[in-house]
Image (cartoon, helix red, strand yellow):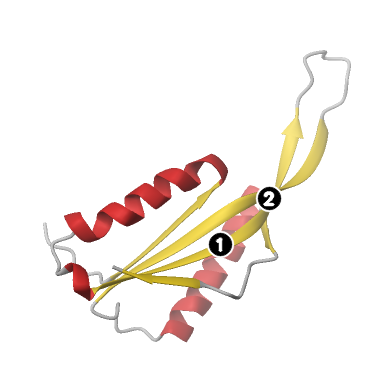
């Protein structure tokens, strides 16, 4: 099967970050493209998550806590990526992320504007 997508968005939080880094560094070697045509953009951030703590004792109330988790966002582009403009893609992804956050109770906070860019 051939897929014509030229842009791949990957994200991970917490303990999944090392796995995402391993996948990211492996992609240029396994994708059926010239590695010099593959650009990888890496951004770090923090996501606020809400935990529901269920006590072992049934007489106690369920409590909630809020905490921050590290997040890693990776964009892999082949030959400059898909024809969509970056602004359009960013807006579309932002709307998607917002609706997912409402469903999961997670919200993104303090995302760094300084992106580290790597090219393989």
Q: Quadrant of the N terminus?
A: bottom left
Name which quarter of the figure residue 51 lies in: top right
Q: Observer-nearest residue: 97 or 67?
A: 67
| Residue 110, horizontal then vertical, whole percent | 70, 65
- Above-or-below relation of 13 to 96: above
Q: Observer-nearest residue: 7 or 17?
A: 17
| Residue 93, horizontal then vertical, whole percent | 49, 70
| Residue 68, horizontal then vertical, whole percent | 71, 50
Name which quarter of the figure residue 55 lies in: top right
Q: Observer-nearest residue: 66 or 92?
A: 66
For label 1, the crowd category at 10 Å Cα-Cα, with few meaning under 14, some 14 to 19 and many 20 or more, is some
Of mark 1 and mark 2, the one earlier in the sequence is 1
For label 2, the crowd category at 10 Å Cα-Cα, with few meaning under 14, some 14 to 19 and many 20 or more, is few
Residue drawn at x 56%, y 62% as measured from the top left: 44
Q: Secondary structure at mark 2?
A: loop
Residue drawn at x 30%, y 84% as measured from the top left: 83
- Above-or-below relation of 107 to 33: above
In this picture, residue 71 sits left or right of residue 22: right
Query: For mark 2, what is the residue?
Result: 105
Name which quarter of the figure residue 34 lies in: bottom left
Callouts 1 and 2 close, C-beta under 8 Å: no
Residue drawn at x 44%, y 78% as measured from the top left: 89
Q: How many numbered tags mark residues here?
A: 2
Q: Quadrant of the C terminus?
A: bottom left
Q: Find residue 61 and name its label.
A: none
- Above-or-below relation of 53 to 11: above
Q: CA distance from mark 1 to mark 2?
A: 20 Å
Q: Find residue 44 and name its label.
A: 1
| Residue 5, horizontal then vertical, whole percent | 25, 69
In this picture, residue 63 sits left or right of residue 4: right
Q: Secondary structure at mark 1?
A: strand
């Amino acid at each position: 099967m051939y897929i014509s997508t030229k842009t791949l968005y990957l994200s991970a939080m917490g303990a999944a970050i090392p796995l995402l880094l391993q996948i990211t560094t492996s992609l240029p070697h396994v994708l059926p493209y010239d590695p010099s045509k593959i650009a990888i953009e890496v951004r770090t951030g923090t996501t606020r998550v809400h935990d529901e703590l269920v006590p072992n004792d049934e007489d106690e109330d369920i409590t909630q806590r809020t905490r921050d988790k590290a997040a890693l966002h990776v964009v892999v582009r082949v030959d400059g990526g898909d024809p969509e403009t970056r602004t359009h893609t960013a807006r579309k992804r932002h709307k998607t992320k917002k609706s997912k956050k409402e469903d999961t109770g997670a919200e993104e906070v303090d995302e760094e504007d300084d992106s580290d860019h790597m090219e393989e």
